[in-house]
Amino acid sequence: MPRFSSPRPTKLTAEERRLERQADELRRKEKELERQLHALPAKMEARRSRERELARLRAETSSPAISLNGVRSRSRQPAKRRPLPARELQNARIKFLVLCLILATIVILLWRAIP
């Protein structure tokens, strides 16, 4: 009489299923790693551009260097000068003329003092 094969799994089929599951898991990991590998350059470039933008923003917003006399500061608008009233303008002209006269006197006196 022929023997019927039992429906219970043999050790070989259980091992095959375990290996198949491992192979499937490895394929999933491989696909995930490939996806990450393709996305990584874009992420790195985005990070670099973000860092460049932050560095530029920090440079613009930081206080200007003394030696540059505020050359880097583009964000600040030059202060608008208010026009002087006529009386103050006249006083300023008189002061300027008096100072010029004093300077001319000093220059003439020094010129005469030099032999």
Image (cartoon, helix red, strand yellow):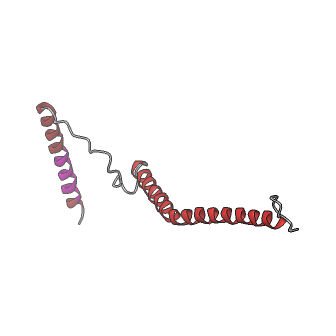
Q: Position of residue 109 (x, y in %)?
A: 21, 55
Query: In which quadrant of the rendered image does the C terminus lie?
Result: bottom left
- Residue toward you, 89 or 110: 89
The residue segment tinted magenta is 99-110
Residue visible at 24% across and 60% down in the picture: 113
Q: Position of residue 82 (x, y in %)?
A: 19, 36
Query: In which quadrant of the rendered image does the N terminus lie?
Result: bottom right
- In the image, is residue 92 above or below residue 48? above
Whether 100 is among the magenta residues is: yes
The answer to whether residue 65 shows anywhere in this view is no
Residue visible at 76% across and 67% down in the picture: 16
Q: Position of residue 40 (x, y in %)?
A: 53, 63
Looking at the image, residue 36 sits to the left or right of residue 69; the answer is right
Looking at the image, residue 1 sits to the left or right of residue 34; the answer is right
Residue visible at 43% across and 49% down in the picture: 62
Whether 6 is among the magenta residues is: no
User: What residue occupies the far right of the structure in this picture?
Assistant: 1
Looking at the rendering, which quadrant does residue 37 occupy? Answer: bottom right
Looking at the rendering, which quadrant does residue 7 occupy? Answer: bottom right
User: What residue occupies the far front of the structure in this picture?
Assistant: 1
- Residue toward you, 103 or 36: 36
Looking at the image, residue 28 sits to the left or right of residue 65; the answer is right
